[in-house]
Structure formats: C-alpha cells, structure tokens
Image (cartoon, rainbow, N blue to C red):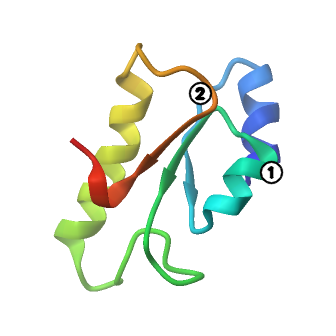
Amino acid sequence: MGLVALELERAGISTVALQLLHAAVAEVRPPRSLWVPFRDGCALGAPDDRRYRRAVLEAAFAMLEDAGLTAPALRDLCTRD
C-alpha cells in the first residue's frame, strides 16, 4: 500500500496508509501512515466494534487535515492526541 500511496500523492491525491507493521513504513516511507495494532486483515479493528472503527478512520482523516505534518509522517493509533 505504501508504494500505491506514493504514486497517488504524486498525482495530487492525498493518502493515509493504515499500517500493521512499523518496518513497512521505514522501508517504503509513504507520506502519511497511521500504525494500527491489529492483526492482518483487520486494519480497522474488530468488525463488530463500530465505535472503535470510526475512531481509526477519524485518526486517519485528522492526519490529512494536519498541515503541520512533514512527510513521511507516522502516528501510532494508540498514542494519538
């Protein structure tokens, strides 16, 4: 996903990658990444936890709105403000 994010950003489309592995961010360096502490296939968390899934999306959208972020930016969902 990080490489796709880089190409979309070059085309002028803002992205936030939900990352399951910190190592992937260090290797690819997408412009904006939100690390989430979930297992593979569940980047938004448990399917039946709508409130928490919404919090993940809100954290990702907040990264898009933060003009102070410098690429590549990585935030951890667990330590977000």
**Real-space CA distance between mark 2 and mark 1, rounded to the nearest whole angstrom:** 20 Å
Vertical order, 11 against 79 (above or below)? above
Residue at 55%, 20% (x, y): give it. 70
Amino acid under disc 1? Glu
Figure quadrant of the N terminus: bottom right
Q: Mark 1 points at which residue?
A: 27
N-terminal label among 2 and 1: 2
Q: Where is residue 37 in the image (x, y as percent from the top left)?
A: 43, 72
For badge 2, the amino acid type reads: Ser
Under tag 2, what secondary structure? loop
Q: Going by the image, does 34 lie left or right of 28?
A: left
Relative to 5, is 36 on the left or the right? left
Residue to which mark 2 is pinned: 14
Q: Residues within 10 Å of mark 2 (few under 14, many from 20)?
A: few
Q: Residue at x 65, y 25 (%)?
A: 13
Is 67 left, or right, of 80 in this rendering?
Answer: right
Label drawn at residue 75: none
Above or below, comparing residue 52 to residue 64 in the picture: below
Residue for point 37% across, 21% down = 66
